[in-house]
Image (cartoon, rainbow, N blue to C red):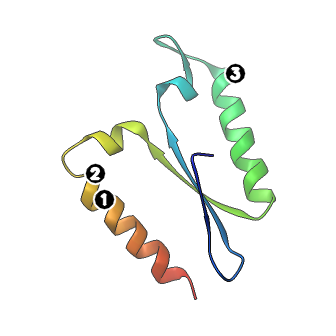
């Protein structure tokens, strides 16, 4: 969990930023690391968290600022 947002109506939102180190060992994809990552995602969801994942590469390109702003606008529009 990289960020936890707590809304006043008890909604809990988890923001994950997943870089290569979350699913690879060196330059090689690791099924074990990937399994750990998705297992934790399921655990959080079953505990009542809304989980949103971003790939690290999404945040380091020319459109990342507008993408993040749009995401948060859409997210907050869904909240009562």
- Identify the residue position indicated by label 1 in the image: 67
Q: Which residue is mark 3?
A: 32
Classify 10 Å Cα crowding around label 1: few (below 14), some (14-19), many (20 and above): few
Q: Position of residue 46 (x, y in %)?
A: 80, 58
Helix, strand or loop status at disc 3? helix
Residue 73 lies, in percent from the top left, at 39, 74
Q: Earlier in the sequence, mark 1 or mark 3?
A: 3
Q: How far is disc 1 from disc 2 in space, using C-alphas?
A: 5 Å
Percent coordinates x, y for residue 11 in the rendering = 68, 74
The image's mark for residue 55 is none
- Looking at the image, is 20 positioned above or below residue 8? above
Distance from disc 3 to disc 2, alpha carbons, whole Å, reads 29 Å
Q: How many marks?
A: 3
Pointer 2 residue:
64
What residue is drawn where x is 33% and y is 68%?
A: 70
The reply to whether discs 1 and 2 touch (Cβ–Cβ < 8 Å) is yes
Q: Is residue 48 left or right of residue 55?
A: right
Structural crowding at the residue carrying mark 3, measured as other residues with C-alpha within 10 Å and reported as few (<14), some (14–19) or many (≥20): few
Q: Are marks 3 and 2 in contact (CB under 8 Å)?
A: no
Please tell me whether mark 1 sits on a helix, a strand or a loop: helix
Of the two numbered discs 3 and 2 in the rendering, the one whose residue sits closer to the viewer: 2
Q: Nearer the viewer, residue 29 or 20?
A: 20
Taking the spot 65% from the left edge, 24% from the top edge, the residue there is 33
State the image quarter where residue 69 is shown. Answer: bottom left
From the viewer's perspective, tell me whether residue 28 is left or right of residue 12.
left
Q: Image point 47% across, 26% down: which residue?
A: 20
Q: Residues within 10 Å of mark 2 (few under 14, many from 20)?
A: few
* Residue at point 65%, 22% (across, down): 31
């Amino acid at each position: 969990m990289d960020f936890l947002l707590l809304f006043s109506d008890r909604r809990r939102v988890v923001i994950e930023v997943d870089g290569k180190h979350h699913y690879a060992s060196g330059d090689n994809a690791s099924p074990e690391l990937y399994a750990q990552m998705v297992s934790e995602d399921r655990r959080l969801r079953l505990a009542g968290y809304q989980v949103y994942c971003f790939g690290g590469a999404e945040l380091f390109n020319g459109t990342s600022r507008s993408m993040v702003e749009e995401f948060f606008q859409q997210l907050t529009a869904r909240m009562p």
